[in-house]
Image (cartoon, helix red, strand yellow):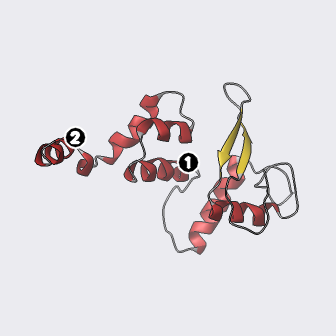
Amino acid sequence: MTRGTGAPCVGRVVRTHGTRPAATVRLVPLPAAVARAIDRAVDERTSGSILRNTLGVRMDRHFATGRLRHLAHTAGIRMPRMHPHMLRHTLVTTLLDAGVGLRDVQIAARHADPRTTMRYDRARRNLDRHPNYILAAYMASGT
């Protein structure tokens, strides 16, 4: 992760290492609030995993699930079967709700196939963005 000074975090990225299909390295841009949270998580470390378990090694999915459930319980969120993939689902649906294009959401979610991203969009059944409304607005504008 590149680090700046105490100034606003512009242009900061974190380098991620994928596992499948090949161990690809990607640079992910960090909004300022996320960069500050990562700074707190890594403290003075300059390499290695951002999230670690109580033994100081890379957090696995089982530990992440337990940690998420604990944080949700502490925050008063009562959901059965809470798991980290719910955060990924929230990211994708929130990006789509914000009007981010399907291709850009696919890239952000690292979905190889756009049909995977489209499944999230269809699952929302959001009629507010139906093409009929876009067409009506276009026709009403007289262009």
Distance from the alpha carbon under mark 2 to that under mark 1 = 29 Å
Q: Which residue is located at x 17 percent, y 48 percent?
A: 137
SS of the residue at dot 1? helix
* Residue at the spot of label 1: 85
Residue 39 percent location from the top left of the image = 77, 63
Out of 1 and 89, give the one closest to the viewer.
Answer: 1
Indicate the amino acid at tag 1: His
Residue 114 percent location from the top left of the image = 45, 30
Mark 2 or 1, which is nearer the eye?
2
Q: Which residue is located at x 54 percent, y 36 percent?
A: 107
Residue 85 percent location from the top left of the image = 55, 48
Indicate the amino acid at tag 2: Pro
Residue 62 percent location from the top left of the image = 69, 50
Q: Which residue is located at x 50 percent, y 51 percent?
A: 91
Q: From the viewer's perspective, tell me whether residue 96 is left or right of residue 135.
A: right
Q: Is residue 57 above or below residue 54?
A: above
Q: From the viewer's perspective, tell me whether residue 44 is left or right of residue 96.
A: right
Q: Answer with mark 2 or mark 1, whichever residue precedes in sequence.
A: 1
* Residue at the spot of label 2: 131
Circle 2 packing at 10 Å, graded few (<14), some (14-19), many (20+), is few
Q: From the viewer's perspective, tell me whether residue 47 is left or right of residue 92.
A: right
